[in-house]
């Protein structure tokens, strides 16, 4: 025996359906918002991992100083130098291009159990994969796993917060 008829205007069944729908929409909004916060945590971790001094070879920065050796001697100008990363270290910053060209995105998929969220941070630079994996002439300068490890505690905290 049923005690109420679903769908009838003003019935308790209809009121419950509306309330559940509102709560589900609110939780899905919060899930998407947490995805954005997770991307921001990844970006902050990336900025932290990609900054700082490295311990590899020292190089002269291209296009710094006078054009010829004689001009450099006359002016007494010393060309600017930078220290490259050693194998196994995160890439050194010479121009800052890799550090600046990251795209964060939150991919959402509606499933039967709710909204699935994937926080994505990817580099727009073609050479990022070469630095991460190395080439035939260069040992890897891994940074992606370090970024994930750095951001993981913050992301766990974000997704562990109670839904309101």
Image (cartoon, rainbow, N blue to C red):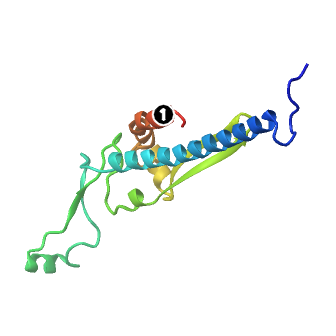
Residue at 52% x, 43% y: name it: 34
Residue situated furthest top in the rendering = 1
Mark 1 falls on what kind of element?
A: loop
Residue situated furthest front in the rendering = 10
Up-down relation of residue 56 to residue 100 (above or below) = above
Residue situated furthest right in the rendering = 1
Instruction: Give the quadrant of residue 143.
Output: top left
Up-down relation of residue 58 to residue 156 (above or below) = below
* Residue that numbered label 1 is attached to: 161
Up-down relation of residue 113 to residue 105 (above or below) = above
Residue 89 in sight in this render: yes
- Viewer-proximal residue among 159 and 150: 159
Say whether residue 5 is left or right of residue 13: right
What quarter of the picture does the C terminus occupy? top right
Residue 146, image x, y percentages: 40, 39
Residue at 62% x, 48% y: name it: 107
Up-down relation of residue 1 to residue 82 (above or below) = above
- Viewer-proximal residue among 67 and 49: 49
Say whether residue 149 is left or right of residue 109: left
Residue 76, image x, y percentages: 8, 75
Say whether residue 44 is left or right of residue 1: left
- Viewer-proximal residue among 18 and 62: 18
Number of numbered discs on residues: 1
What quarter of the picture does the N terminus occupy? top right
Residue 128, image x, y percentages: 47, 53
Residue 10, image x, y percentages: 81, 41
- Viewer-proximal residue among 52 and 152: 152
Residue 134 in sight in this render: no
Q: Residues within 10 Å of mark 1 (few under 14, many from 20)?
A: few
Instruction: Give the quadrant of residue 113.
Output: top right
Residue at 60% x, 46% y: name it: 29
């Amino acid at each position: 025996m049923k005690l109420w008829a679903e769908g009838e205007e003003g019935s308790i069944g209809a009121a419950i359906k509306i309330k559940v729908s509102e709560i589900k929409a609110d939780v899905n909004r919060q899930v998407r918002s947490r995805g954005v916060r997770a991307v921001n945590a990844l970006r902050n971790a990336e900025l932290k991992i990609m900054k700082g001094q490295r311990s590899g070879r020292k190089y002269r920065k291209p296009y710094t100083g006078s054009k010829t050796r004689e001009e450099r001697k006359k002016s007494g100008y010393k060309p600017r130098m930078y220290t490259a990363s050693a194998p196994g270290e995160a890439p050194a910053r010479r121009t800052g291009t890799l550090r600046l060209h990251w795209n964060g995105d939150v991919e959402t998929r509606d499933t039967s159990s709710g909204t699935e969220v994937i926080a994505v941070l990817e580099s727009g630079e073609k050479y990022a994969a070469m630095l991460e994996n190395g080439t035939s002439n260069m040992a890897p300068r891994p940074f992606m796993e370090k970024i994930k490890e750095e951001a993981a505690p913050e992301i766990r905290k974000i997704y562990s917060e109670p839904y309101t």
